[in-house]
Image: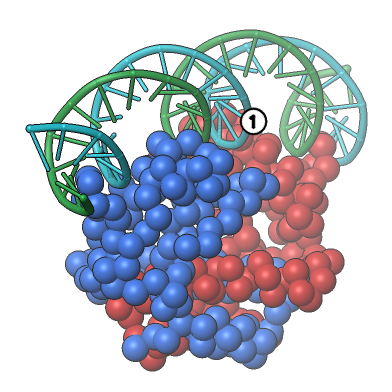
Chain colours: A blue, B red, C cyan, D green
Amino acid sequence: MQIKIDNASDRPVYQQIIDQVKRDIALGRLGKDEKLPTVRQLAGQLAINPNTIAKAYQQMEREGIITTRPGSGAFVANLDSDLSSSVKKKLISEDLERAAVDAFHMQIDGQTLLKWFNEAIEKFNLK
Amino acid sequence: MQIKIDNASDRPVYQQIIDQVKRDIALGRLGKDEKLPTVRQLAGQLAINPNTIAKAYQQMEREGIITTRPGSGAFVANLDSDLSSSVKKKLISEDLERAAVDAFHMQIDGQTLLKWFNEAIEKFNLK
DNA sequence: ACACTTGTCATATCTCAACTATTACAAGTA
DNA sequence: TACTTGTAATAGTTGAGATATGACAAGTGT
């Protein structure tokens, strides 16, 4: 479990942890039932407060990404999204439209953007 | 100039304003040299502090999105991106990969994601 | 049973970004 | 000259994020 914290980032530390765990799962680097580092382990390794790690784990559990058990640890859960299709589309389209707006202002043409999009999804085996 | 503030959003107010101005420009609703609402106007309309509007305008000027002149107002500037191609790709790919990761966890297949992507870029006439 | 590990909880404290409130000023407009 | 406009400065409030520390209940291993 290789996690890196970018202190220059405007993104909070606990959110960076969530991002990277979700990314590793999507990339297949973390499989179902696989064990995550313990709260105190990761806190020591990253030299940050255990509460911050705990916050990340708790939020991921709420999202259904992992399951946690005191005494055992934290483990990757099943893929199980209970969101409605319309909510899913809304959440994801926000990211996609933000990319499109930025592309416009950066004068990126549609063809280039599509190429980058394909590169992005090839990293993750969607479907 | 129709701007809506979502107080429930985790996104700061000044950032929401920037998002929507950039979006309106990309959508063609705001054209070059077109005048934005004055700081005090928009502040009154949204019932928020003028400083917050000013902050948004200042940041947009720094980004080259608009030009401002005391006494006159704020106006849409030229499209003029000075970022290198690699930086552009990095910034945009962050959004695209985030969408891909979320899609994975929401169990969205690649085909559906591609459809949503096309819908997103059709709103903006990219080239 | 016992010692240990693990996630969780609670409290207190610190920092910083965001926002508000208010006043003043310089540049442009009419 | 009177007015509008963006900008600046100062002071204050709020909340999120992070830290420090200690305790607790649930699970593990012997």
Q: Is residue A3 left or right of residue A88?
A: right
Query: Does dot 1 land on a helix, a strand or a loop?
Result: helix
Q: Residue at x 51, y 83 (%)?
A: A123
Q: Residue at x 79, y 57 (%)?
A: B64
Q: What x and y, as percent, mark residue A37?
A: 40, 55
Q: What x and y, as percent, mark residue B79?
A: 78, 68
D14 over A48 or under it: above or below: above
**Residue A109, quarter of the rendered image:** bottom right
Instruction: Give the residue type at disc 1.
Output: Asn
A38 over A80 or under it: above or below: above
Q: Is residue B60 visible?
A: yes
**Residue A82, quarter of the rendered image:** bottom left
Tag 1: Cα neighbours inside 10 Å, few (<14), some, or many (≥20)? few
| Observer-nearest of C17 and A75 | A75
| Observer-nearest of B59 and B124 | B59
**Residue A110, quarter of the rendered image:** bottom right
Return the residue at label 1.
B51
Q: Is residue A63 left or right of residue B77?
A: left
Q: What x and y, as percent, mark residue B1?
A: 56, 53
Chain letter belonging to callout 1: B
Q: Is residue A31 left or right of residue A1?
A: left
Q: What x and y, as percent, mark residue D5?
A: 73, 37
